[in-house]
Image: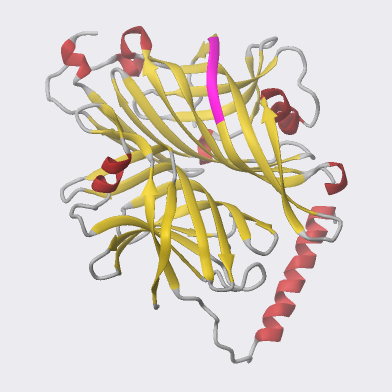
Amino acid sequence: MNLHALLKSFFSVQAGLLVFCLWGTTFNAPASDTNVFLAKSNLTGDALSSQVSNIKAGEVATLLGSTNANLVIALSVRDFDALPTGLRPVVEIVLFNQATSAIVETLVVFDLGAQGNVPLYAGSRTVTARAQGTAGSGLVAANVNALITFTRTAAGPTKLTVAPLGALTYNDGTNDQRIILQSGQLKASGAPIVVTP
Amino acid sequence: MNTTSCFTQRFHQVIRTASIAAIVLATAGAGRAQCLVDNVTNIIWRVDIKAGLATQNYDVNVFPIVSKAKVGTAEFLAFVLGRAPAAGEVLALNLDLRAGTTNIYLSVFSTNTRSNSVLISQPTNSLTTALIDCTNMSFAVDAPLPATSATWLGGRLQLTGTGKLGANGFAPVKVKGSLGGFIVDGRPADVGGSTAIVTRATMKIRGTPLRVQPPIVP
C-alpha cells in the first residue's frame, strides 16, 4: 500500500470513528445568525447583448436583479462562530431588500467547508479562503471562484470581502443570459444587519 | 471587418465532463455574415503569469499565520514540472475556439518539439464559458488541475480573460486575464510543500503564436 492509500485509509477510519462517537448523541447545532452587510462593489465584467461589452459595477447589480432602490447586492455570512473547528462558515452574495431587511434572493453560495475549498486561518480572527461558488435561488448557474476574507470578533463578523472570478447565468424573464466577472470585489460596508434564521 | 459581421455574435457555452459536451450557439441577426471563428484551430500562445500565493503556517508559539509569496512564470513552471524548466519549456495558453467546441487550457509547451509536453489543465474536464463576437471575446474557465508528478498535486484554477479577434475575426489575440484558485505543492512541508491559495494573479500572452495547430479531439 503506498503512502497516499495509507493516509486515505487512515482518515477514512478516523472519520468512521467520529461518526460512531457522535451516533446517538443529541446536540443542537450552534448555527449563528445570518449577518448581512451592505456591499460596496467595484465588480466589472463582460456581457453579451448585441456584442460583447464591458459592464461596470452598477450594471452588474442591475443585471442580477437590483431593479429598484430598495434592492441591493449584499453579502451575508453565517455559521461563522465555531471557527476553525466546528461549523462550516458560509458566505453568500445576496439580493437584499433594505426596506424590509430581508434577503430576497441568494445569488451565489460559498461554503468554505465544502470539499475543494481552501480556507486559511490567520490567528483565530481572520479567515482567508478560496471557495468555489454555487448558484443560489436567484441564478440559473454559477461557475465562479472567489477570494474571501473576513474577520470576526466575539460579537460577530466585522469585515468581509468577496472577490469573485467567473461566469454567472441568470434569466432575464425570457432567456438565460451570462455575465463573466473579470475583476473587482464586493466589500462589506457598515455594521452587519442580523437576520435571524 | 465589414459592418454586418460586427453584428454577428456567437455565444459558446461549453459544459464538459469527461464524456459530455453541451454546446449552445446563438447567432443574432438572420442572414448576417458569419465571422470566421470556424477557421480557428488551436492557437497556442506563450503566456506569462504573476501570482500572489498564501499558505497556512505557524509561528514559534504555534499560532496560525498566513504566509505570502509572489510567484512568476518560471517558479510556476518549476512547481508543475517538479524541477527547473529546461531550455525551450514555456508556459502556454491554448485557445481552441472552433464552432462546436471551446477549449481553453494551460500547458507546458516545448519549443524544441513544438508540442505540449504537459497539460496543466485538462480540456476534457474543464467548464468553459465564452462570449464571442467578431471583435472581442471574454471567457471563464473552471479548470481542475490533475497531479502530474510526485511534487505537483494539481489543484483548481479559475481562468478569466478577454481578447481581441484578429485576422478578420478568426484568431484570438491580445489575450490577458486573471487566475484564481489553489494549487498543491506535494513536497514535504519542511521544504516548502503546501496547499497554496492564489490570492491574486494575472496572465498575459506575449510574442507571436507558439503554434497554430489542428484542434485536439476531446
Q: Nearer the viewer, residue A27 or A82?
A: A82
Q: Is residue A3 left or right of residue A132?
A: right
Residue A140 x %, y %: 31, 53
Asked where in the image residue A57 lies, by quadrant, the reply is: top left
In the rendered view, would you say B6 is above or below A159? above
Q: Is residue A101 magenta?
A: no
Q: Nearer the viewer, residue B157 or A191?
A: A191
Task: Identify which residue is drawn at 71% across, 12% down.
Answer: B88
Q: Is residue B206 magenta?
A: yes
Most foreground residue, B211 or A61: A61
Main secondary structure of the magenta stretch? strand
Q: Is B81 above or below relative to A65?
A: above
Give the residue at x 47% y 37%: B141
Quarter of the rendering containing residue B168 = top left
Task: Judge from the rendering whether residue A171 lies leftward or rightward of residue B120; answer left or right.
Answer: left
Q: How is the image coloured?
A: secondary structure
Region of the chain picked out in magenta, as a range = B202-207
In this view of the protein, can residue B122 be seen by the observer? yes
Is residue B210 visible in this depiction of the protein?
Answer: no
- Report which quarter residue A138 is drawn in: bottom left
Query: Is A130 located above or below residue B85 in the figure?
Result: below
Residue A125 placed where, x, y %? 63, 63
Vertical relation: B39 (above or below) A121: above
Please tell me which residue is depicted at 55% across the width and 87% down the height of the picture.
Answer: A28
Residue A37 falls left or right of residue B36:
right
Residue B58 image offset from top left, x and y in percent: 80, 55
Please tell me which residue is depicted at 24% across the width and 52% down the height of the picture: A65
Quadrant, the N terminus of chain B: top left
